[in-house]
Amino acid sequence: MIKNVIFDFGNVLLEWDEDKIASNYSTNKEEQEILKEVIFMSDEWVKLNDGSINCQDAILIFKEKLPTNLKNRVEEIMNEWYKTMPINQEICNLIMELKKNNYKVYALSNTLISVYEYVKNLEIGKYFDGFLISAVEKMMKPNEEIYYRLFEKFELVPEECFFIDDSEKNIEASRKCGMEGHIFNIKDFQKLIEELNKNNISV
């Protein structure tokens, strides 16, 4: 019987779109593309997510890589980019409904510490029973190690957990670790409800 529902952040709770995020910091398409490539598509971005570099180090690297006219955008972007991501209200409503029905709700996300702190302090953040964040743990999905860390940290039984993530690889890994899950399409919320019902999760 499922007792715990675990949510990813990007393209589940929050809409992650590098193009949209970059468009908040320049109206010029070419500049948007440069910002996207240098920051959000970079090796340093992966390192921020896995906790191997911190934000200040990344800012210095991004400034070195960007043309002069974009260097002054870096600190602003890094301090607030995550606040520009739309929050998925359907998922928020689902989380509140799950809590009402006595399920435990957790987050398992490959993301930066700043994003974790932002979500934790949102109104929806208070509904989570715990967060497991890649940059904090210094391990990332789909590495099985992070799933076992989730179970250990919150004393969860894998077979009593259901994971919602937008990545097929991440759900495949979770199933290998004994936790059922659903590959979420942000444009098809109804499919998620059907999967929850199939797994006898009351919503």
Image (cartoon, grey):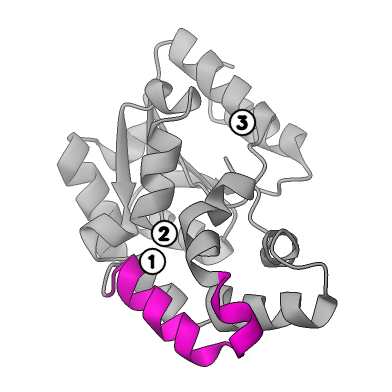
The magenta segment is 53-73
Q: Is residue 2 visible?
A: no
Residue at label 2? 110
Give 59 or 172, whichever is nearer the viewer: 59
Residue 185 placement, left or right of 120: right
Look at 45% across and 74% down and name the residue there. 45
Determine the image quadrant of residue 34: bottom right
Residue at label 3? 91
Q: CA distance from mark 2 to mark 3?
A: 18 Å
N-term-proximal mark, 2 vs 1 = 1
Determine the image quadrant of residue 72: bottom right
- Which type of secondary structure does the marked residue at label 2 adopt? loop
Q: Is residue 171 visible?
A: yes
Q: Residues within 10 Å of mark 3 (few under 14, many from 20)?
A: some
Disc on res. 116: none
Give 135 or 185, whichever is nearer the viewer: 135
Look at 31% across and 76% down and name the residue there. 57
- Is residue 192 placed above or below 182 in the rendered structure? above
Q: CA distance from mark 2 to mark 1?
A: 6 Å
Q: CA distance from mark 3 to mark 1?
A: 23 Å
Amino acid type of the residue tagged 3 in the rendering: Ile
Residue at label 1? 49
x, y percent for residue 35: 64, 77
